[in-house]
Amino acid sequence: MAGVLFEDIFDVKDIDPDGKKFDRVSRLFCESESFKMDLILDVNVQIYPVDLGDKFRLVVATTLREDGAPDDEYNPANTGPSRADQFEYVMYGKVYRIDGDDGSDASRL
């Protein structure tokens, strides 16, 4: 797929361990199936409910367009084909932080 930077399956290991900060959002602590990687992800659980032990596929891409052409925004009203059509939940924005553990092969996204 053109524009895909990262793709993997994640297992939800913990949800809101420090307590729930917002009514509709939960912080998921996840572990990668393919890499030594942990993921902390905030999800609107009113729209996309998640439980402990759930698995989900995460794709980080530079564009949602199937042809790989750049786009500046996500608009669900667009009628053209989109990579978003393959998923139940789509987030548009920037990756907040990527941390690598010094002296370890593990990474945090």
Image: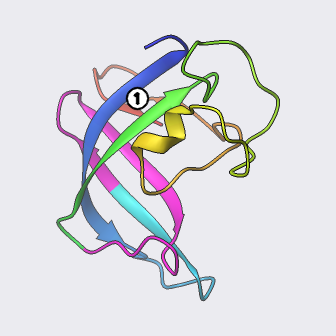
| Residue 33 on the magenta span | yes
Residue 83 at what x, y percent from top left? 51, 32
Name the residue: 63% across, 37% down: 95
Residue in the foreground of this view, choosing between 45 and 12: 45
The residue labelled by disc 1 is 101
Q: Tell me which residue sits at (56%, 33%) in the image.
A: 82
Quarter of the image where one finds residue 96: top right
Q: Amino acid at mark 1?
A: Asp
How would you rate the neighbour count of disc 1 (Cα within 10 Å): few for under 14, some for 14-19, many for 20 or more? few
Q: Is residue 41 magenta?
A: yes
Q: Nearer the viewer, residue 99 or 87?
A: 87
User: In this image, 105 relative to 82: left or right?
Assistant: left
Q: Is residue 1 left or right of residue 65?
A: left
Against 58, residue 7 (above or below) is above
Q: Position of residue 7 (x, y in %)?
A: 36, 28
- The foreground one among 61 and 86 is 86
Furthest toward the bottom, the residue is 23
Q: Quadrant of residue 29?
A: bottom left
